Image (spheres, rainbow, N blue to C red):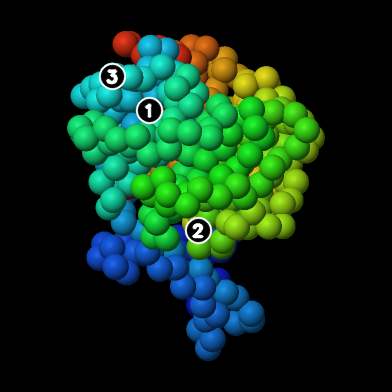
Amino acid sequence: MGWRAGWEKEVGVTKWPESITVRSLTWAACITLLVVAVAGCIPGDFGIGVIVTRGRPTAMYWTDSRPGRVRRASLDGEGAETLVTAGLQFVDGIAVSLDFGKIYWTDTGTDKIQRANLDGSGVEDVITSGLDDPAGIALDVAHGKIYWTEFESREICRADLDGAGVEVLVTTGAVPGPVGIALDVVRGKMYWAEAGSDKIQCANLDGSDVQDLVTAGLSIPFGIALDPIWAKIYWTDEGTSKIQRADLDGSDIEDLIAAGLDTPQGIAVDASARKMYWVDDGTDMIQRANLDGSDIEDLITLDISVPWGIALLQ
C-alpha cells in the first residue's frame, strides 16, 4: 500500500496539503520555513513545505470603528476589554504579534498608523504623514516590516516596524479600492482585496508580478486571510454578504457562508484549530466557524459598535 497511502487511510486525509505545521519550537526556529523535497520516503516528486509556527492563537483583537476602540477577548469571546480609545477616530485594520509584543492599527479618520503594547499601554505614532485612508495592515516581524493598503490613493505600501523607510510597492488601479491585506512570507507573496474593482489580487512582497486571482462573482470584497497549511485564501464580501475561499492561485472558489451575514468585514484564520473568525458591522457581531463554514458560533454580540478589523494573537 505504501507509506503515503497507508497514512491517508489511517488519518482519513484524501487531499494533501502543501505544508506541514511544526509547533513547540523556539522563536529562533519559528521564523524559518524550509521547503524541502523528500527523497526516498514518498514515491514520486512530492515536496513538503515545513511551516514552523509558534502554536495556536491565544486571543482575538479587533477594532470598533465607531467609536474608535481597540479591543480584545479570549477566543471564545469571554473577558472582552477595551484597550485603547484616546485619540482614535475611525480605526480600521489591525495586526498583532506575540513575539514582538505589539498591536498595530490603521485609523482612516486621523490618517495614522499607530501601535501599542499587547495590553494597550504605550501607544505610539508609527506613521503620521503621507497617508491617504489607510485600511488593511499586516506584519512581517521576521523581516522587520509592516505592510498596509491605502484606499484613496490606491497604494500598497510597507515600512520598517518603527515607521521608517516607507516604500510604495503597488499602485493598484484607476479607482480607489485596496482594503484587506495578508502576507505569505514563506512563499514571498502578499494578497489583497480590491473593493473598488472587485478583485482578489497578489504580488511578490516587493510589489512585483501583480496578478489578478479572482475577478468574477465579487461585489466589494473586503477582509482577507490565508491558511498556509492547506494553501487557501479566505475573504469576506460586503456586497454579496458571503465568506468565500479559493486556492492560492484563485482556482477552486467555494462559497463557505452565503446566508445570515450582513456586512462582513475583517477575517482571521486559525489554521491549526481549523477555525475562521470574522466581524460583521451590519449585525455588530464577531462570529467564528469551521474552515468549511460549518458550526457557526456567535462570540461577541454586546458592547460592540461597527467592528472593522480582526486579528488573532499568535
Residue nearest the viewer, comparing 25 with 128: 128
The residue located at (57%, 29%) in the rendering is: 132
Q: Amino acid at mark 3?
A: Ala
Q: Secondary structure at mark 1?
A: strand
Q: Earlier in the sequence, mark 2 or mark 3?
A: 3
Q: Nearer the viewer, mark 3 or mark 1?
A: 3
Query: Is the residue marked by circle 3 packed among few (<14), some (14-19), or many (20+) residues within 10 Å?
Result: few
Q: On screen, 49 above or below 132?
A: below
How packed mark 2 is, by other alpha carbons closer than 10 Å (few <14, some 14-19, many 20 or more), is some
Q: How far apart, in angstroms, are the residues tagged by discs 1 and 2?
A: 23 Å
* Quarter where residue 157 is shown: top right
Q: Disc 2 marks which residue?
A: 185
The structure residue drawn at horizontal position 29% and vertical position 19%, both measured from the top left corner, is 85
Q: CA distance from mark 3 to mark 1?
A: 16 Å
Q: CA distance from mark 2 to mark 3?
A: 33 Å
Q: Is residue 268 left or right of residue 224?
A: left
Q: Quadrant of residue 14?
A: bottom right
Q: Is residue 198 left or right of residue 72?
A: right
Judging by the rendered image, the residue that carries numbered circle 3 is: 86
9 is higher (above) or lower (below) than 161: below
Tag 1: amino acid: Trp
Q: Is residue 255 visible?
A: no
